[in-house]
Image (cartoon, helix red, strand yellow):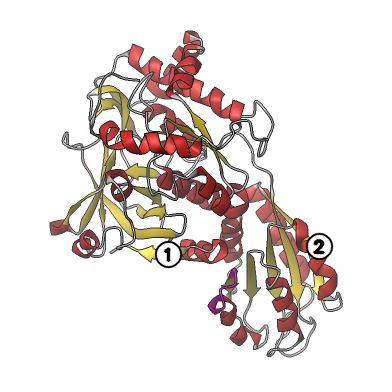
C-alpha cells in the first residue's frame, strides 16, 4: 500500500474495512460462472430467449399473413449473429399448438419474446399470453399495427407488476434493443467481480450476500498483498511491450510520467488480467486504486476498452451500473466526480480514469494524453478528449433497487488543473433543479456514495425504463 494517504483513501478507509468483513463470507473458489480458464476477455454463455407466435394467420381481417413468421425467423437469426451472445429457441404457432405444451419448455429459457399476430379482445390469444407471462420470465410482446384490437388489454400487465415490455410498433429495430436488454439479468447471474481492499457505496451494494441474492453476482474479495504478488510475477519485458503498444505509441502526448512509471502501470494491468483469468471475473473494483503497486487508472481504462469493467475507488454501485450498461448496450462507463455551473446549465464531469473507446470495444479510440493522477500528482492517469455534441446518460444503480438517471449533451472540453484529468461539460435541462435534487432524496451514505455517477455515450433513458420493468427496479430521474 502506498505511504501517501489522499482524500479519497481517507474517506474510504472505514468503509473498506467493514466491507471486507462482509464480503469475506464469499468464497473465492466458487465454481466458474462461464468460459474456460485462460480466455481473455472471458466469454459469457448465450442468453436463451424463447420465441412464440400467437394468433391466427392468413388473409383475414386484422390478422398478420402467415409468411411473416419466416420473415421474423430470418430477422432473429440476424440478431443472433450481430449480438453473438443470444440464442432464440422455440418458435411454435399458437394455435394450432396448445399453450400448455409450451409452458414446460420455458424452464431452460432466460426470457420470452411473443409475437402477437391477431386477437380482438380478451379471448384465446390474450389467454395464451397470460399463461406464458405468468411463468414469470422477463417477456417482450411485439405487436404490429393491424394485429387486432387485443392491444387494449396489454398495458394492464405492467400495471399488475408483470415483467413485460410492450412493443406496439412496426419498427423491427425495437426488437434488437429489447433483446439487448433481456441479456442483462442472465449475464449478471454469470458475473464475478473482484473487489480489492473492500467495497464502498450504499450498504446494500457493499454486502456480497445481498448482491448475490438480488442480482446473482458473485463477489471475490482480494487483498492488496495479493495484487502486489501478482504484479511482481509479471515479466518486465511483457510490461514494456504492453506499455509501448497500447499506451506510449498511441498517446497524443506524455506530460509528466516517466517511461518507467508507464511500464509499471502496464505491469499492473497484466497482473490484474492474470487475476481476472484465474477467477474468471468480468469486473474489478478497488478501494486501493490510488495506492501500490501502481495506480489503477490505466488498468481500468483498458479493461473498459475491452468490454469488461474496471471501476475505481471500490465503488460497487457504479460497478454494477457499468455492468448493466455494458451488457445492455456494449459500452463502457466513465465514473465521475461531478460539479455544477448553474450559470451555463452545466453538469461538469471529471475523473482520472477513463476508457478511450467510449463507443465500445469495436469503436475508435478517443485522443488521449498521459498524465499523473491529479490528487497525488503521482502515478499515471489519462486526459481523454471526449466527443463534442455527444448525447450522454448519467446514471447510478443504488441500494440494489433504484436507478438514478439523467441525460445531457457534451458541449465543452476543459483541462482545468483544479479538477481530475479527463473533463467534459454537459448541458442539462435544469442544472439548478438537479443540484437541489442530487440523489433524489433516496441516496444516503458517505461522500463516495453521494458523489459518484457513471456517464455513458447515448441517450438510454427509455431503454433503462424498460430494463427496470424486466428486472424489477425503480427508475428515478435526477433533476
Q: Is residue 252 visible?
A: no
Residue 401 among magenta residues: no
Q: Is residue 308 visible?
A: yes
Q: Give how far across and how far down residue 48 sits, in percent.
A: 71, 54
Nearest the eye: 204 or 97: 204
Give the residue drawn at x 34%, y 15%.
261
Confirm or deny contact between disc 1 and disc 2 (CB under 8 A). no
Within-10-Å neighbours for mark 2: few <14, some 14–19, many 20+? few
Inter-mark Cα distance, 1 to 2: 32 Å
Q: Give how far across and how far down residue 327 sits, in percent.
A: 55, 49
Q: Is residue 169 above or below residue 459?
A: below
Image label count: 2
Give the residue drawn at x 31%, y 50%.
445
Residue under pointer 2: 105
Bounds of the magenta segment: 158-164
- Which secondary structure, mark 1? strand
Residue under pointer 1: 475
Q: Is residue 40 above or below residue 389?
A: above
Amino acid at each position: 500500500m502506498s505511504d501517501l494517504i489522499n482524500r479519497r483513501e481517507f474517506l474510504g478507509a472505514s468503509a473498506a474495512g467493514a466491507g471486507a468483513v462482509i464480503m469475506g463470507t464469499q468464497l473465492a473458489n466458487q465454481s466458474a460462472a462461464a468460459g474456460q480458464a485462460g480466455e481473455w476477455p472471458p466469454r459469457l454463455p448465450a442468453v436463451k430467449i424463447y420465441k412464440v407466435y400467437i394468433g391466427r394467420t392468413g388473409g383475414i381481417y386484422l390478422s398478420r399473413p402467415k409468411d411473416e413468421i419466416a420473415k421474423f425467423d430470418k430477422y432473429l437469426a440476424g440478431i443472433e449473429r450481430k449480438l453473438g451472445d443470444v440464442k432464440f429457441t422455440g418458435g411454435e404457432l399458437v394455435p394450432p399448438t396448445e399453450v400448455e405444451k409450451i409452458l414446460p419448455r420455458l424452464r431452460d429459457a432466460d426470457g420470452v419474446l411473443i409475437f402477437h399476430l391477431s386477437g380482438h379482445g380478451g379471448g384465446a390469444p390474450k389467454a395464451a399470453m397470460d399463461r406464458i407471462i405468468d411463468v414469470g420470465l422477463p417477456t417482450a410482446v411485439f405487436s404490429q399495427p393491424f394485429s387486432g384490437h387485443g392491444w387494449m388489454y396489454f398495458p394492464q400487465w405492467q400495471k399488475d407488476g408483470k415483467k413485460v415490455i410492450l412493443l406496439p410498433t412496426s419498427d423491427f429495430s425495437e426488437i434488437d434493443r429489447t433483446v439487448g436488454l433481456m441479456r442483462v439479468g442472465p449475464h449478471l447471474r454469470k458475473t464475478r467481480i473482484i473487489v480489492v481492499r473492500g467495497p464502498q457505496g450504499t450498504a446494500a451494494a457493499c454486502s456480497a450476500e445481498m448482491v448475490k441474492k438480488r442480482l446473482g453476482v458473485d463477489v471475490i474479495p482480494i487483498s492488496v498483498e495479493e495484487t502486489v504478488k501478482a504484479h511482481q510475477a509479471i515479466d518486465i519485458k511483457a510490461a514494456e511491450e504492453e506499455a509501448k503498444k497500447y499506451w506510449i505509441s498511441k498517446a497524443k502526448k506524455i506530460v509528466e510520467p516517466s517511461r518507467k512509471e508507464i511500464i509499471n502501470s502496464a505491469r499492473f494491468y497484466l497482473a490484474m488480467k492474470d487475476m481476472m483469468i484465474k477467477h474468471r471475473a468480468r469486473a474489478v473494483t478497488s478501494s486501493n486504486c490510488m495506492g501500490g503497486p501502481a495506480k489503477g487508472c490505466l488498468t481500468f481504462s483498458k479493461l473498459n476498452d475491452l468490454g469488461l469493467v474496471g471501476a475505481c475507488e471500490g465503488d460497487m454501485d457504479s460497478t454494477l451500473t457499468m455492468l448493466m450498461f455494458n451488457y445492455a448496450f456494449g459500452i463502457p462507463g466513465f465514473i465521475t466526480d461531478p460539479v455544477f455551473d448553474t450559470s451555463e446549465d452545466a453538469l461538469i464531469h471529471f475523473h482520472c480514469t477513463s476508457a478511450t473507446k467510449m463507443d465500445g470495444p469495436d469503436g475508435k479510440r478517443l485522443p488521449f494524453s498521459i498524465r499523473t493522477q491529479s490528487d497525488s500528482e503521482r502515478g499515471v492517469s489519462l486526459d481523454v478528449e471526449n466527443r463534442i455534441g455527444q448525447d450522454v446518460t448519467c446514471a447510478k444503480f443504488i441500494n440494489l433497487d433504484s436507478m438514478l438517471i439523467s441525460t445531457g449533451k457534451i458541449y465543452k472540453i476543459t483541462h482545468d488543473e483544479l479538477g481530475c484529468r479527463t473533463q467534459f461539460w454537459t448541458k442539462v435541462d435544469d442544472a439548478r433543479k438537479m443540484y437541489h435534487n442530487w440523489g433524489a432524496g433516496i441516496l444516503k451514505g458517505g461522500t463516495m456514495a453521494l458523489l459518484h455517477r457513471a456517464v455513458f455515450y447515448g441517450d438510454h433513458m427509455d431503454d433503462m425504463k424498460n430494463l427496470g420493468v424486466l428486472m424489477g427496479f425503480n427508475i428515478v430521474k435526477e433533476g
